[in-house]
Amino acid sequence: MFGVLVNVLAILVGGSIGLVVKKGIPERFSKVIMIGLGLCVMYIGISGSMQGENLIVFVLSIVLGVTIGTALRIDERLTALGKMIEKRITSKKSKSDDKCDNENALKAKPSFTKGFVNASILLCVGAMAIIGSFESGLTGDHSILYTKSLLDFIAALMLTVSLGFGVIFSAVAVLVYQGSLVLLAQLLRPLLYDPVTLAEIGRTGSVIIIALGLNMLGVTKIKIADFLPAIILAPILSMIAERI
């Protein structure tokens, strides 16, 4: 779990620096930073999607995964969670200049939610998050998570500049998600320590990252979180395929 804790700390520090830096950066630069980060996300996703061997497993994972995610309304629930957190925070602020504050709150609301959701998906779904957590749980090697921590530090800083303090709360999602993967890997060590299975997990997560990059560039409005069950299905279908 040490690698996960380092990752969480990197996000908190990067996000905090982003909040400070944001005050001195004009909005036009924030938009350009978001576009640049979106392109980087696309590159990361495309690079990771080249791995994997079984195309049928990949296709079934994506199709069945998004079907399950849509049925469970994962994206909708995750967005609602972001709004709930924001509401609790903003309710503690002073109610002076109500009219002005209400207008600002309406403008800030999408930013907080978008920051929380996008950052949570970006920092959790990538191949490095999954494989790094599995590697940490299976072998005790945290090197992948250390590398991811450096990248997440930069990503959290840049995302906070563009999307606000909602990004910082993604550290909680990373702690729960990657911590759970580490514990799960330790429990399922005999089944998961397979390069083929890890490759299929990485490819599925990377394609979801590509979709996130498209959203960040404003090209699409894909409900990314609805695809998350595909990451769970990928290792299951991969193991079934190997036994057929």
Image (cartoon, rainbow, N blue to C red):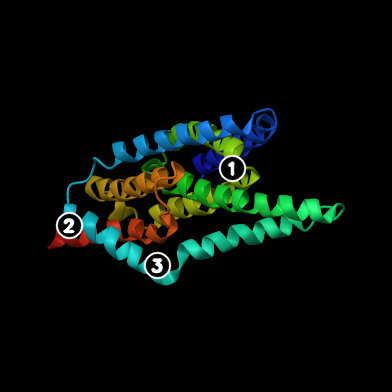
Instruction: State the residue in front, 123 or 73.
Output: 73
Q: Work out whether residue 91 can be spotted.
A: yes
Q: Indicate which label's residue lies in the foreground, 1 or 2.
A: 1
SS under mark 1: helix
Instruction: State the residue in front, 82 or 39.
Output: 39
Instruction: State the residue in front, 139 or 42.
Output: 42
Mark 3 / mark 2, whichever is N-terminal? 2
Residue ID at (60%, 35%): 161
The residue that disc 3 covers is 70
Among all residues in the image, which is located at the extreme bottom?
Answer: 71
Residue ID at (28%, 62%): 63
Q: Residue 205: give x, y in percent of width and height.
A: 35, 49
Residue ID at (40%, 67%): 70
User: Residue 218: which quarter of the image?
Assistant: top left
User: Residue 69: which quarter of the image?
Assistant: bottom left
SS under mark 2: helix
Q: Amino acid at mark 3?
A: Thr
The residue that disc 2 covers is 56
Mark 1 / mark 2, whichever is N-terminal? 2
Marks 3/1 in contact by CB < 8 Å: the verdict is: no
Q: Residue 56: give x, y in percent of width and height.
A: 17, 57
Q: Amino acid at mark 1?
A: Leu
User: Residue 20: which quarter of the image?
Assistant: top right
Total label count? Answer: 3
> As displayed, is residue 162 above or below residue 203?
above
The residue that disc 1 covers is 163
